[in-house]
Amino acid sequence: MTGPPLPAPDRRRAQLAENLASVRARIDRACVDAGRDPAEVTMVAVTKTYPAGDVVSLAGLGVTDVGENRDQEAAPKAAEVAAAGADVRWHFVGQLQRNKARSVVRYADLVHSVDSVRLAAALGEAADRHRDRPLAALVQVNLDGAADRGGALVDGGDPDREVAAVAAALAGHPRLRLAGVMAVAPLDWAPERAFARLAEVAAGLRADHPDAVVVSAGMSGDLEAAISHGATHVRIGSALLGMRSTLR
Ligand SMILES: *Cc1c(COP(=O)(O)O)cnc(C)c1O
């Protein structure tokens, strides 16, 4: 490149534009390979650890959906982005404590990480009091049954954490809308296996809840496998914003 160097904010915007183009190209190619229409796949830009200015830049580049995993970070960031005049849908994708429900329902459009009946109830009560429209939510599915990981369990055990019970709790609350399922591939599973399993769970859920069509699966490293197994939402952080210094 020739010419004077760009000022830092312009350099950052150019970097985001370049990253966005390459992620979009990966999504498009994965859709072609899977015989799917790219319009079926929503890219959620996971902006955790990155500033509100990056969200505003991404919105300016056409990104409509943004994800965060901690309320302490997301709530002020959402306010800052709104104050800057950018309009995006906020996705809450992280582990959620019941005492944060009241805050999250104020800005989130879709909560991906509901993994207990008690959390569903807390969100319903919070949505009733602190929100003027229903809140959409996904059941986060624990694919390998590892007890120390988040996610509702497919095969019984604790009734508070069964997929079917969590789904029923979301579907049964007037202020909530059961929209589908979400999962993170277990680190020691091939992504293909993980997302094939999630697709089975999603199909099982749709038998009882035909409108629960969202499948949130796939991150920077495995979005192709997720799209080949029917993901409607991919959650992309590092491929878009850069590597994070912390492991979250
Ligand atoms: C951080 C995070 C992502 C994005 O991960 P990358 O590998 O950076 O794309 C997706 N989903 C959840 C739940 C996350 O916490």
Image (cartoon, rainbow, N blue to C red):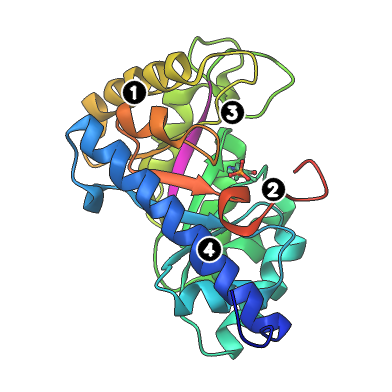
The amino acid type of the residue labelled 4 equals: Ala
Tell me the residue that label 1 is attached to.
Answer: 199
The amino acid type of the residue labelled 2 equals: Arg
Q: Earlier in the sequence, mark 2 or mark 1?
A: 2
Give SS at disc 4: loop
Q: Using the numbered discs, state the Cα–Cα distance from disc 3 to disc 1 in whole angstroms.
A: 15 Å
Front position in the image: 76 or 117? 76
Q: Using the numbered discs, state the Cα–Cα distance from disc 3 to disc 2 in whole angstroms.
A: 15 Å
Crowdedness near tag 3: few (<14), some (14–19) or many (≥20) residues, C-alpha within 10 Å: many
Front position in the image: 103 or 30? 30
Tell me the residue that label 3 is attached to.
Answer: 151
Residue 196 on the magenta segment: no
Q: Using the numbered discs, state the Cα–Cα distance from disc 4 to disc 2 in whole angstroms.
A: 15 Å
Look at the numbered disc 4 and say if its residue's Cβ is closer than 8 Å to ligand 1: no
The image position of residue 169, as x and y in percent, is: 45, 37
Main SS of the magenta segment? Answer: strand
- Assign ligand 1 to one image quadrant: top right
Front position in the image: 90 or 96? 90
Query: Does residue 212 appear in the picture of this structure?
Result: no
CB atoms of marks 3 and 1 within 8 Å? no
What's the magenta region? 136-142
Give the residue drawn at x 74%, y 53%.
Answer: 99
On the rendered structure, is 82 left or right of 49?
A: left
CB atoms of marks 4 and 2 within 8 Å? no
Q: Which of marks 3 and 1 is nearer the N terminus?
A: 3
Give the residue drawn at x 33%, y 17%.
Answer: 200
Front position in the image: 239 or 197? 239
Q: In which quadrant of the rendered view does residue 133 lie?
A: bottom left
Q: Using the numbered discs, state the Cα–Cα distance from disc 2 to disc 1 in whole angstroms.
A: 28 Å
